[in-house]
Image: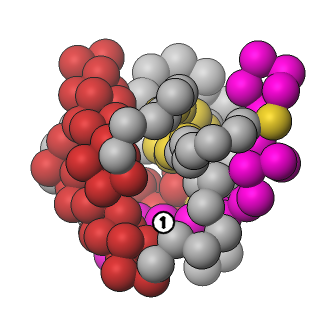
Amino acid sequence: MTDPDLPSDVQCALAEGLTGLAVPVLRKSSARTIVHIDLVPADRYFIDGRPLTGGRDARVEAGITLGTNSAEEKAAFIARAGELLSDLLGPLPRGGVALHELHPVSYGYHGVTQFDYYRRTTDVPAVTAGDSGSLRGPLSPSPTR
């Protein structure tokens, strides 16, 4: 976000809005959703190799567990997050949204990988930790991720 002076109420609205999208659109748990807002000066934000001047821009980057969301869900989140950015921040020159799919053995919360979390919270057969394919099938009975 290229506005180091972004008011705290707008920051809260962004965090609440992004969490509010992640829950129904990506089927994520709000308790396991973290929003980190990084405010930077425009001269440290580059578009086409040049520092941004005369306005603000924003980029949302979200990490999700590999294989837990369909292409349609990801597209819906990207579209609605882009709308949220424009609604709260006004017109943006780039206003990007990126979803990074992370393998469940590569990250977690409270010292527990997503792989182990899913294995403990579902009564379906566990996927092997070395499986790099889709995890959607064995994980789909869980309503939130």
Q: Position of residue 97 (x, y in %)?
A: 47, 34
Quadrant of image for the N terminus = bottom right
Give the residue at mark 1: 35
Q: Residue at x 30, y 56 (%)?
A: 88
For the residue marked with disc 1, what is the amino acid?
Val
Task: Identify the secondary structure beneath mark 1.
Answer: loop
- In the depicted view, which residue is nearer to us: 111 or 58? 58
Q: Position of residue 129 (x, y in %)?
A: 63, 39
Asked if residue 62 lies left or right of residue 22, the reply is right
Asked if residue 91 lies left or right of residue 54, the reply is left
Q: Residue at x 43, y 72 (%)?
A: 11
Instruction: Mark yes or no: residue 102 visible.
Output: yes
First to last magenta residue range: 31-50
- Residue 133 higher or lower than 128, as above or below: above
Q: Residue at x 60, y 26 (%)?
A: 131
- Residue 93 higher or lower than 16, as above or below: above
- Residue 73 higher or lower than 30, as above or below: above
- In the depicted view, which residue is nearer to us: 43 or 34? 43
Q: Position of residue 9 (x, y in %)?
A: 35, 81
- In the depicted view, which residue is nearer to us: 71 or 132? 71
Instruction: Mark yes or no: residue 26 visible.
Output: no
Q: Is residue 2 magenta?
A: no
Q: Is residue 39 magenta?
A: yes
